[in-house]
Amino acid sequence: MRLSKYKLLSYRTLKQVNSAIKSPFRLLKRQFSSQIQICIIGSGPSAFYTAQTLLKNHQGVHIDMFEKLPSPFGLVRYGVAPDHPEVKNVINTFTEVAKNTRFSFLGNVCIGRDIILRELQEAYSVIIWVCFYFHSMINFLFYKAYGTAVDRRLDIPGESTDIPEPVIDCLSRSKVKNVILIGRRGPLHVAFTLKEIRELSKLHITSSQSKCFINLLPKDVFSVTMGTSDQIQELLSELPRPRRRLTEFLLKMHNSSDHKTNHTAYPVYHCNLQFLRFPKEIVSNGEHHSDKNRSIVSHIKLATVKLNGPTGLHQQGVIDDTQPLETLPCGLVVRSIGYRGVRIDPDLPFDEQRGVILCKDNNGRVVDLPQISYSFSLSPMYCAGWIKRGPIGVIADTAVDARQTAETILKDLSEFEKRGHVDVLNKRGLSVIQRYLNERNIHVVKFKNWERIDEAEKLAGQILDKPREKLTTIQSMLKTAFTDIEQPK
């Protein structure tokens, strides 16, 4: 009898070993919690594409996505031009990800303030940074109802867009007829795309049935920055195709604008691309804005810039001290010099000069934290999107980059599972973080709460014959999110 029992145990053991050889993860996962707990900080395109790839290719992961705003989707919601609603269709894909039973959205939670990195390390087996907290361009996002800048004023038309009504009302009274874009370098170095400048060149002002004309300044900008006609053609032939097409378009526009200004009346609306200039000083007229204690701009002083190095894409601009400052009269100055990432937690490895997270390689592996500072095993960290590579590229580029990081994570997880790192892979996830959130009285906006906001905005938009009428403050979003559930204090 004992011998029979012993034989039975041996058979079961051998069967388990044989099964493990065929599928190592099936045996290893019994040593760990039911799911590997992963957190993603940020909820923009990079975040959702990363989550999508992980959920699709690893059935044993659960993802918690943290967002400081009550609303998900990042710059798809706040950064896409209102006259390009088709770009926002990707939100449908992201919503499918959010509905996955192995996914949780936690809005209104600011990592670095409400929850710190040390606490994330305690709770999660993998930490992925895709949040691009930024400087500068946030000053321009008010027209998309970014919650922290809703009291700003600017004016562009948009009756059938999702621009909030208070902004449209302000924009409809605009008297702006002349816009000057100031850039340090030349036409060869512009950051906008061919599609963007082409659309600007076709812009018609509906209120006056006028076209907006574009001029490239100074008049000799191409000869100064690129040389003679033959030299320009030779340089164009050596450029990558996207940059070549863009530069050719600018050159054609420049030649065309010279012709038009000689044969037509001065346009009512025009936009000047002022190259080789650097803002040195913004000067007020001594008066103050009526409802804000702010000075009114009178003019801006510009320094002349010269390009150093061989003619090409990598020239650097330096101020030419031999040239006097120019005075440009203006009534409004908008700073639009791009995004710059910022460190959101003092323990986060960060490159302050580039404004990105410090990585070991190009695959998104973040530099290791010093183990001596922690009483528990450290989990690997990764990053994707602009906080990984800088504010370059559109949504399609973001998707490629996010999937690259996700594939790196999957590869590393496979190694962790093979080696049986129980101390890292067996972390408890949200149950740890929820305790901190409760202690700090943080009202978490879950995806079902966001759907209340989404529904309310769409209903308000229907009344105005718009896709949606966005809620323009954090307070109004929270009030809507918790209606009939709980009113945040």
Image (cartoon, helix red, strand yellow):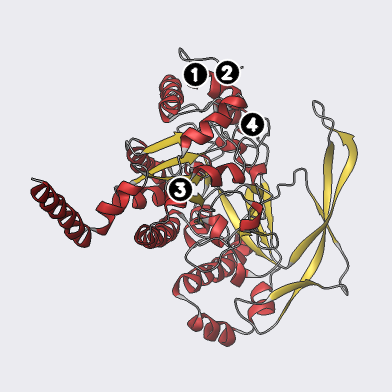
The tag earlier along the polypeptide, 1 or 2, is 1
**Is 266 in front, or is 175?**
175
Could you say which disc has been placed on residue 135 in the image? none
User: Where residue 218 appears, x then y in whole percent?
Assistant: 71, 68
The Cα atoms of the two marked residues, 1 and 2, are separated by 7 Å
Percent position (x, y) of residue 482?
49, 18
Residue 328 place in picture, x, y as percent: 80, 55
> How far apart in space, not on screen, are marks 3 and 1 (Cα)?
25 Å
Q: Nearer the viewer, residue 425 or 267?
A: 425
Can residue 161 be seen in this snapshot? no
Q: Amino acid at mark 4?
A: Val
Q: Nearer the viewer, mark 4 or mark 2?
A: 2
Amino acid marked by disc 3: Ala
Q: Earlier in the sequence, mark 4 or mark 2?
A: 4
Q: Quadrant of the N terminus?
A: top left
Q: Is residue 168 left or right of residue 240?
A: right
Identify the residue position indicated by label 1 in the image: 482
Q: Amino acid at mark 1?
A: Phe
Q: Which residue is mark 4?
A: 150
Q: Is residue 444 visible?
A: yes
The residue carrying pointer 2 sits among few (fewer than 14), some (14 to 19) or many (20 or more) residues within 10 Å by Cα, namely: some
Mark 4 is surrounded, within 10 Å at the Cα level, by few (under 14), some (14 to 19) or many (20 or more) other residues, namely many
Q: Which residue is mark 2?
A: 488
